[in-house]
Image (cartoon, helix red, strand yellow):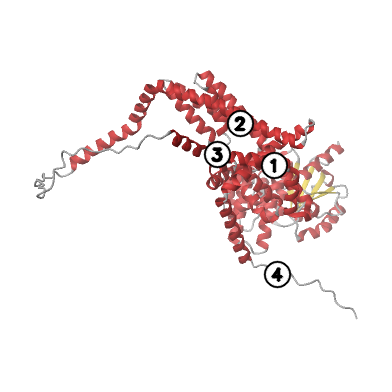
Amino acid sequence: MSTPVTSGPEPVRTPPRIHRALSIIAAGTILALLYFARDVLVPITLAVILSLALNPLVRLLRRLGLGPAFSALSAVLLLVLACASFAVVIGTQVVRMAVSLPQYQETIQAKLRTVDELTVGGLQKLAQQAGRVIQQHLPKEEPVIRPPVLLPPGSADTSNLVPVEVHQPPDQPLTVIRKVVESVWGPIATAGVVLVVLVFALLEHEGLRDRVIRLAGVTDIRLTTFALNDAGERLSRFFVSQFAVNFGVGAAIWLGVALLGLPQAIVWGALAALLRFVPYVGVWIAALFCAMLAAAVDPGWSLAIETIGLFIFVELVAGQLVEPQLYGHTTGLSPLSVIIAAIFWSWLWGPVGLLLSTPLTVCLLVAGRHIKALSLLDILLGDTQALTMAEGFYQRALSGDSAEIIARAREFLKRNTFAAYCDIVLMPAIHLARLDFGTGTISDDQQAKVRTAVTAVIGELLGQPRGWLRKWRSSAGSSLGRQLRTLREERTGRWQGPLDVPPYSIVLGVGLGTTADDLATEILVRILRDDKVDARHLSIEDLQAPPPEAKPESIAMIYIVSAYPCEERHRATALIQGIRARLPKVRIVTAFFPGMMTESSVDTVAAADESAHSFAEAIHMYRNASAEAA
C-alpha cells in the first residue's frame, strides 16, 4: 500500500491589509533612517556616487599598466587637484570682484532708487492717494482735549536721562582663530571622510559588487548582475554627458560674458556650470546674479538685458539641441519625477541631496525596473508611458474626452499612417471596451460614451461632413460601419460604383457580422480607396445575392474581416467555401485582427489563400498581388 506523498504545509499568506500596513511601516522606517542618519549616509553616498563617476578613469589607468591601488589613488589625486585648482582660481576672481564692487556703488544706488520708484514707490503713491480719497469721505471728528499727566509725588523726572550702550569687548586673536576653525572644520571633516571612503570604494569595486549580488539575490545572479550593470551604465553615461554639457555651457557663458565686457567672466562661467547640476533652476540662478552685476556695471539696462538674453540662448541650445543629441533620455526619468526628487532629497539631505537627487533617483528607477516588488517606482519615476496608446484611448473614451483623443491621433498621424493608427490604437481599444462590457465591468452608459467617442474620432479622421454624427444617432440600430458605408452609397450608388469595370479591378471587403467587423471592413475599404483601389464594402447577404449584371471576373480579391477574436470566426471556413464555389479564381484573404492579443494567437483559416493580422499587412498583400499580376 503506497503512502501518499505530501508537499508539506502550504505557505501562510499575509492578508492584504496587513501587507499594506507593513509596507507603510517599512517606508516610514526607511525615511526616518535616511533623515536622522544623514550625517553618516551623506558622505558615504557621495563617495559611492563619485566612485561610479571615477571608475571609467580607474579602468583606463589600469589598462595603461598601473596597478589597482595606484590607479585608484591617482584618480582620487587628480580629482583633488582639479577641485583645488578650480577653487583657487575662482576664489581669486571672487576676491578681485569684491574689491572692485565699491566703485559701482553710485550705479547700484541709482538703480535701486529707480527700482524703488517703479515698485514700492508707486505702490506708496497709490496708497497715499487712496488714503486721501477715503479721508475726504470720512466724517470729521472733534479734537479730544486730554488732561495733563501728573507725576506722583517723589518720582523723578526722566526727560533728562542719558541712554547707556553696552559694547562687547573686541575678540582676541585666539578667539577669532577658534571661530574660523569651527566654521571650516565641518566641511573639511566631511571632505576627508568622502575621500577615504572613495579610495576604498574604488579599491573594493569588484568586491562591493559581489557583496551586493549576494545580498540582493544569489539565487538569480543573472538578473542582479544585469540590474547592477544597468544602474552603473546609466549613472556613468549620465555623469559624463552632464559634465560635458555643463562644461560646454560654462565655456559659452564665459566667452559670451567676456565679449559683453563684464568683469571676472570666468567666475560667471564657472557658476553657470556648477549651478546647472541643480535641475532646471540652477542655471537661472546664475543668470540672475550675473544680470545683477551687469546692472551694477552699466548705468543703463542694456547690458543686463543682453546678459539675460545670452543665458536664454545658451540654455535653449544646450537643452533643446545638444542634450537630446548627446544622451537623450539617458536617465529614463520623467521631468516631473526629476523635480519631485530634487525637492524630496533636498528636504532630506539639504544642498548635497539636491545635487545627488538625480543619481539617487536613477538607482531607485533601476531597482523598480528589475525588482518586481518595487515596480511601483518604475511607474511613478520612469519616462515610459504608464498606459499603452490603446489603453489611453479607452480611458479617455470612458471619460468622454473626444477632443484629447483626436489631438493625440493627429499627433500620431504626423509620423505614421492611418492604417498603423487603427492597428495600434483604435481596434485594440474597441476590443478592450468589448471585453469589459462582456464581463460587466462597464455599464451601458459607459459603453455608449465609448461608442460616441469612437464615432467622433473616426468621423474627424475620415473627414466626414458636419451633421453626419447627428444623422447616425437618429438612425436607431445602425452601426457606425454601416452608416459610413451608407454615406458613400449616397454618392456612388447602391453598389458603390459601376458594375461594368475591367477584369480583376474590384476588391471587396466583407465583415463577419459584428458591428466592430463592419467598422473594421469600412476602414479597410477606405484605406484601399485612398490608395486608388476600387474597393467596396459588402455584407454577407450582399455577397450571396449579387446583382445580375455583376461580372464574377471583375473581382480580384475578397477580404473576410474580423475586428477581434469572437465566435463569428468559426463560420469563416463555411463562408470561404461558399465563395469558392461561385468565384473559384478570386483570391481570398482573411483579415483577422488580434485586438489586445499577440499576433501569434491570431486565428487563421486554412481555406483562405492568405491571412493578414493587421491593416498594414492587408494593404501590403494587395500590393504584392497587384505587382505579381502586372
Circle 4 SS class? loop
Q: Is residue 417 visible?
A: no
Q: At x 57% / y 32%, what residue is drawn? A: 274
* Left or right position of 503 against 162: right
The amino acid type found where label 1 is placed reads Phe
* Residue 531 x %, y %: 74, 38
Q: Identify the mark at residue 156; answer none if there is no mark.
A: none
Of pointers 1 and 4, the one earlier in the residue sequence: 4
> Gap in Å between the C-alphas at discs 1 and 4?
43 Å
Residue 409 in the image: above or below residue 515: above
What residue would you read off at disc 2? 83
Identify the residue position indicated by label 4 in the image: 12
Separation of marks 4 and 2 at Cα, in angstroms: 56 Å
Q: Which mark is residue 200?
A: 1
Q: Name the amino acid, label 2.
A: Cys
| Comes first in the chain, label 1 or label 3 | 3
Q: Amino acid at mark 3?
A: Pro
Q: Residue furthest bottom?
A: 1
Can you say which quadrant of the picture contains the C terminus?
top right
Q: Is 439 in front, or is 606?
A: 439
Mark 2 crowdedness (10 Å alpha carbons): few <14, some 14-19, many ≥20: few
Question: Separation of disc 1 and disc 3 at Cα?
Answer: 20 Å
Marks 1 & 3, CB-CB < 8 Å contact = no
Circle number at residue 187: 3
